[in-house]
Amino acid sequence: MENMKPRPQGRSGAPRTSRHGPAKHKKRPSSAPRGVAFRSDFDPDGPLRLYGLHAVEAALRNPKRAVRRILMTENAENRLQAVVTERQVAPERVSPRDLDRMLGADTVHQGALLETEPLDEPSLADLATKADTAGPIVLLDQVTDPHNVGAILRSCAVFDAGGLVMTRRHSPPLDATLAKSASGALELVDVALVQNLARAIDELKEHAFTVLGLDGEAPTLIEEETFAGRVALVLGAEGKGLRELTRQSCDRLVRIGAPGPLASLNVSNAAAVALHASAWRQRQG
């Protein structure tokens, strides 16, 4: 990506949660309401947990998102009453302290917790078809910070990107931390996970994509691109930028015009600028 002093990758101090939830109490706390069970820590067969009002509301509005169990405080249920009624689900009533025990006292759950399943993954061919009526596909080369990826998903939703592609390794899980950072965009943007990014780029080329890699040292400005036909944008991790094999796999490298004293952007901001440039070009015809 456009090189700048790297932002720490990983959880960035966020509460540690897995897709399967935090620690289990061997005994249900005496203050827990009747019927509320406290699940084990990292149960490999357990559900994916999403929390926070925006993330839970977006998940409930997504007909593709299964609802296994939903826990809400009275206040959260009142705020989400419309979507709860529309989805025809019956939340289990809990207190904020119950959710603190389940998720950790530092978790900003806003009184809402949904237990669900991961969404079905689209294929690259699926994303190629969608790109015919949407914006570019965005590919991430080892961007590991879930907050950055969540922000990129938001930009993909705002600018109607054709989808997001990440590697199965060296990418954050599609869990509650990322979903909360995405503010509902995880339910709106198709995310494909691939084993090898270079092979994924080659496959996209077989689907007639032009693949543009963002690089702060590239000779060509992204603003000069026409964005005609199917386009894929590849962004690298903070600090490291695009790996060499990824750079070689792209059709060409482009940079964002930066007349200011700093010549680079955070990866999520760069994604937003690149998608805006594409949307502007497409509007110009």
Image (cartoon, helix red, strand yellow):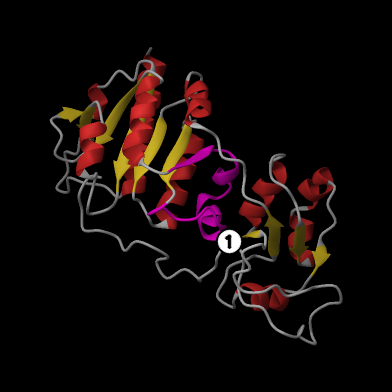
Residue at the spot of label 1: 19
Relative side of 111 to 86, left or right: left
Q: How crowded is mark 1: few (under 14 residues within 10 Å), some or many (20 or more)?
A: many
Where residue 211 sits, quadrant-wise, is: top left
Residue 40 vertical placement versus 71 (above, below) = below
Q: Residue at coordinates 58% horizontally, 47% vertically from top-left? A: 184
Relative side of 144 to 257, left or right: right
Amino acid type of disc 1?
Arg
Where residue 12 sits, quadrant-wise, is: bottom left
* Quadrant showing the C terminus: top left
Relative side of 62 to 141, left or right: right
* Magenta segment boundaries in residue numbering: 169-194
Q: Position of residue 247 (x, y in %)?
A: 22, 37
Residue 173 vertical placement versus 281 (above, below) = below
Which residue is at the front of the view, 55 or 235? 235
Toward the top, the furthest residue is: 285
Q: Where is residue 81 in the image (x, y as percent from the top left)?
A: 80, 52
Which residue is at the front of the view, 4 or 253? 253
Q: Residue at coordinates 22% horizontally, 31% vertically from top-left? A: 254
Across the whole image, how many numbered discs are drawn on residues?
1
Where residue 278 sits, quadrant-wise, is: top left
Q: Where is residue 154 in the image (x, y as percent from the top left)?
A: 49, 43
Q: Which element type, helix, strand or loop, lies under badge 1? A: loop
Relative side of 227 to 176, left or right: left
Q: Residue at coordinates 15% horizontally, 34% vertically from top-left? A: 218
In the image, residue 78 lies in the stretch drawn in magenta = no
Which residue is at the front of the view, 110 or 67? 67
Q: Where is residue 46 in the image (x, y as percent from the top left)?
A: 67, 63
* Quadrant showing the N terminus: top left
Q: Residue at coordinates 79% horizontally, 58% vertically from top-left? A: 78
In the image, residue 185 lies in the stretch drawn in magenta = yes
